[in-house]
Amino acid sequence: MLANLGRRLGSRSALVGRLMHTERKVRVNGADLHIVETGSGEQSLLLMPGALGSAWTDFKPQIEQLPKLLPGHTIIAWDPPGYGKSVPPQRKFGLEFFREDAQAAVELMRALDRPKFSILGWSDGGITALIVAGRHADAVDRLAIWGAGAYLNADEAKALKNIRDVAKWSPRMREPMEKVYGVERFAELWAEWVDAACAFYDQRDGDFCRSEVEQIKAPTFILHGKKDPMIAAEHIPWLRQRLPQAKYHEFPDGKHNIHLRYAEEFNKLVADFFNKKA
């Protein structure tokens, strides 16, 4: 009996050990990028957060649950340069910030000796993921995105300008990011992001990554909250037309944060996709 108990406790301890996460900084192009790493599989999955997002603000249920569903993967969630705990450097925007994040992500994974990887990208992270998959096709195994479009249209640009001033937001909406950046810095950073996003509309016909989407070769999974207020509905058929082999799943009542609101269902769907061998 004691032997059986010992084996059970030992097995549970090993399981807990495998599922524990580690946090560290990785030097990439002179910047110390913060990552959260969990799991111990040979395959690699990079979690890419949304605007101003970080590993923990955007992916807590995935960091905690996906290792059980993806035992063959090591999961890395990053804070992009200038976001979360990857400060310094101070965040820089401009018309190349998505492509600069994409390049930094590729170089991060090379620094981790994981040059071939899959991506789970939300919102801004989804845009960055599309760029990585288009510009570095040989590096990307599989790709899952949601809450992202390849361009910004007029209605979206107008909507962003209407929410530029975070003082008009409810405290519940502001507080998570204020905890990360502080009240003043969050307001500044969000305004800078809105201005940068709208500059794409004003100067580049809204184009974030239209050309990169055409170059994607990796198996792709598009997930979508049908009631997402942050992206225009037209983005989904636009992407599906250009990625005709892509798998698609819709959450009928889902909004922008389907991976948080429906975490258990979402995690199972993406784990099934990433677990496929071909």
Image: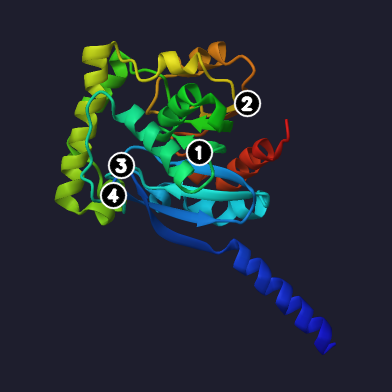
- Location of residue 206 with respect to 220 vertically, above or below: above
- Quarter where residue 152 is shown: top left
- Determine whether the residue tagged by mark 4 lies in a helix, strand or loop: helix
Instruction: Determine which of the numbered discs, if any, sits on residue 177 in the image.
Output: 4
| Mark earlier in primary sequence (1, 3) | 3
CA–CA distance between discs 4 and 2?
33 Å
The alpha-carbon separation of the residues under discs 1 and 3 comes to: 18 Å
- Camera-near label (3 vs 4) is 3
Quadrant the N terminus occupies? bottom right
Point out which mark residue 258 bears.
1
Q: Which of the two marks, 1 or 2, is nearer to us in this view?
A: 2
Are the residues flagged by discs 1 and 4 in contact, CB closer than 8 Å? Answer: no
Regarding residue 118, the answer to whether it shows in the image is yes
As helix, strand or loop, the secondary structure at mark 3 comes to loop
Q: Badge 3: how crowded within 10 Å, few (<14), some, or many (20+)? A: many
Q: Which residue is mark 2?
A: 219
| Residue type at tag 1 | Ile
Q: Position of residue 45 (x, y in %)?
A: 55, 43
Going from the N terminus, do you reach mark 1 or mark 4 first? 4
Tell me whether the residue at label 1 lies in contact with that at label 2, contact meaning CB atoms closer than 8 angstroms.
no
Q: Nearer the viewer, mark 1 or mark 4?
A: 4
Q: Please report the residue visible at 23 percent of the width from the left and 46 percent of the height from the top.
A: 89
